[in-house]
Amino acid sequence: MASCASITLGFGEVLCEPDQPHAAAYFPQTARISLLAEAEGHPPMETALIGSEGMLGATLLLGSHSAPQRAVVQSEGTALRIAPDELLREASVGSALLKVLQSYLHVQIAQLSQTAACTRFHAVEPRLARWLLLAHDRAQNDHFHLTHQHIADALGVQRSAITIAAGVLQARELIDYSRGEIKVLNRTGLETASCACYATLMRQYANGFHK
């Protein structure tokens, strides 16, 4: 889109706050963006991870200019930025862009629901494997930087639980983890270690864009 600007997003940069107007919509290229939900007395928990497969600001298509959640840059990288009014102008009724963005919004809603169920019913180790697979998909690299505390906050668990679960995955030689540096060693093994939610998320994504 000609009305998009190419920018670099910095780690930890807050892109929107709940109930506040979207200043812009973003299409990550190499950056990754976390959507965070908050509950009083608890640190924010990640509900979705957005990479080059998606966008931040899809709810603008519903006519709501206020962000439903906080969005924070999880990994520094490039993105395309567009003003909300320009996005809505580009995504006019009947346009190919509107159809793609509507499909993505459908997928994102399904994934939020799946993440909620996974958080409630599954143990930390398979949830960690699922989360690492999602991060790996969006990192476009086998190696990425994530601290135990960051992952613990994302999954809504204690840091010690991540230390134990990551140790198990490392002992099985599925990942290598040292000083916040993660390397995926065995992608197939990590998929086996994950709960079925990862496969469900991928199926929802495939079905959403190939209806």
Image: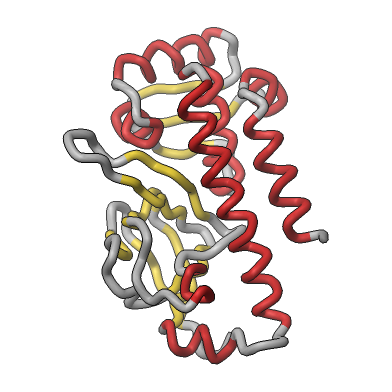
The answer to whether residue 13 is above or below residue 79 is: above
For residue 159, side relative to residue 119 (left or right): left
Q: Nearer the viewer, residue 183 or 95?
A: 95
| Residue at (61% x, 44% y) in the render | 137
Residue depicted at 55% across the width and 20% down the height: 126
Query: Which quadrant is the N terminus positioned in?
Result: bottom right
Q: How is the image coloured?
A: secondary structure
Q: Is residue 134 above or below residue 85?
A: above
Give the percent coordinates (x, y) of residue 43: 24, 37
- Residue 203 appears at what percent x and percent y? 74, 43
The residue that appears at 56% across and 53% down in the rendered structure is 109
Q: Which image quadrant: the C terminus?
A: bottom right
Q: Is residue 75 left or right of residue 198?
A: left
Depicted 43 relative to depicted 28: above or below: above
Single out the residue that lies furthest toward the left.
41
Residue depicted at x 36% and y 66%: 67
Give the total number of marks visible in the rendering: 0
Q: As rendered, which of 202 and 81 lies closer to the eye?
A: 202
Kindly give the residue lying farthest to the right in the view shown. Answer: 211
Relative placement, left or right, of 153 versus 1 is left
Residue 93 sits above or below residue 10 on the image: below
Residue 15 located left or right of residue 193? left
Residue 38 rendering spot, x and y as whole percentages? 28, 44
- Residue 26 placement (x, y as % from top left): 46, 70
